[in-house]
Structure formats: structure tokens, C-alpha cells
Amino acid sequence: MRKVSDILGRKGASAVAVAPDTKVIEALNIMAEKNIGSLLVMDGGEYLGIITERDYSRKIALRHKSSVDTKVSEIMTTNLPAVNPSDSVEYCMQLMSDKNIRYLPVFEKNLLAGIVSMSDVVKETILQQKETIGHLESYIHSGL
């Protein structure tokens, strides 16, 4: 069974972070530049939340607020459930599905270890299925 640690090991534990007083427009530019859909919001080494493209669309664009004047701390998501490296990929998928969320912060011993996205979970699931198929094909061919 695949674990969150497998995802972090493959993609790396580092995630892009911004300070809470960063303007939303600057956060959007960072996301576009890095081709990512979220940023951690950190104050020093302390995790405060996450800002996502969904936060922007629902809390800025639809409310006709200014991304130039608004700080990420005003629209960030703070109540995401956390997972740890030993949690299963299946657990993450279920949690994301049940809560209708796309990102999970990963904590190990109360320290932020990274972030897992729905895309990460899907990629890991596909990789696991490919490996299973490879093992089955090898088993079938070894018996001939």
C-alpha cells in the first residue's frame, strides 16, 4: 500500500510558500510562473494555511475584490485536514473526496513536511496500477 511518504519522496517535500501579507496578485504571479495551483502561507517557519486558485476565484473574482489590494491572509484556506507521511494514498483520496478539497498539508511531528495535491494522489495511484500490471505480466510470462 502506497503512503504519503512515497509521494513526497517522488516529488520532493519542498513547497512554494509566501508570507501572509503577500498581495494576492503577487501570489497568482508566482503560481503562474511555477505552473502550480497553490502556495503555502507561512509566517517564518509556521504554517498558517494555503492559498489556491479556487480561493482566488471564489473570494476575489466572484466578489469583485481587488487582487492588488488584498493580502493572501484574507482569503487563504486555514481549515484543511492534515495528513502524515505514514498515511495511505487511499486515505488521502477518500479524505479529499469526502471534503471536496484538492490539497492536504503533510505534518510529521508537528512540523510541515510538504503538501499533497489531488494530482499527486492520482499520479501515485496510476503508478501503483502500472507496477501491479507489470508484476502480473511478469508472473504470467514466467509460467510459460
Image (tube, rainbow, N blue to C red):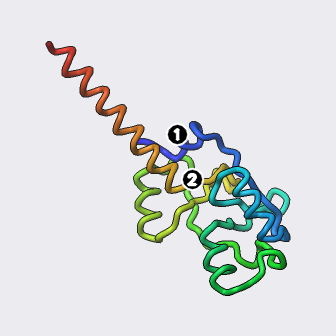
- Look at mark 1 in the image and give the residue it sits on: 6
> Which comes sooner in the sequence, label 1 or label 2?
1
**Residue at point 65% right, 60% down?**
38
Question: Is 132 situated left or right of 8 in this image?
Answer: left
Secondary element at image label 1 = helix
The amino acid at mark 1 is Asp
Q: Is residue 52 above or below residue 127?
A: below
Please state the horizontal and vertical placement of residue 58, each as a whole percent of the image.
61, 79
The amino acid at mark 2 is Val
Give the label on residue 78, or none: none
Front residue of this view, candidates 67 and 112: 67
Please state the horizontal and vertical placement of residue 55, each as a whole percent of the image.
64, 73
Secondary element at image label 2 = strand
Residue 49 image-quadrant placement: bottom right
Q: Residue furthest left?
A: 144
Question: Is 13 situated left or right of 68 in this image?
Answer: left
- Look at mark 2 in the image and give the residue it sits on: 116
Q: How many marks?
A: 2
Question: Is 53 situated left or right of 3 in this image?
Answer: right
Which of labels 1 and 2 is toward the front? 2
Q: Is residue 143 above or below residue 126?
A: above
Q: Residue furthest bottom?
A: 63
Cα separation, mark 1 vs mark 2, equals: 11 Å
Front residue of this view, candidates 143 and 83: 143
Quadrant, the N terminus: top left
Give yes or no for contact between labels 1 and 2 (Cβ–Cβ under 8 Å).
Answer: no
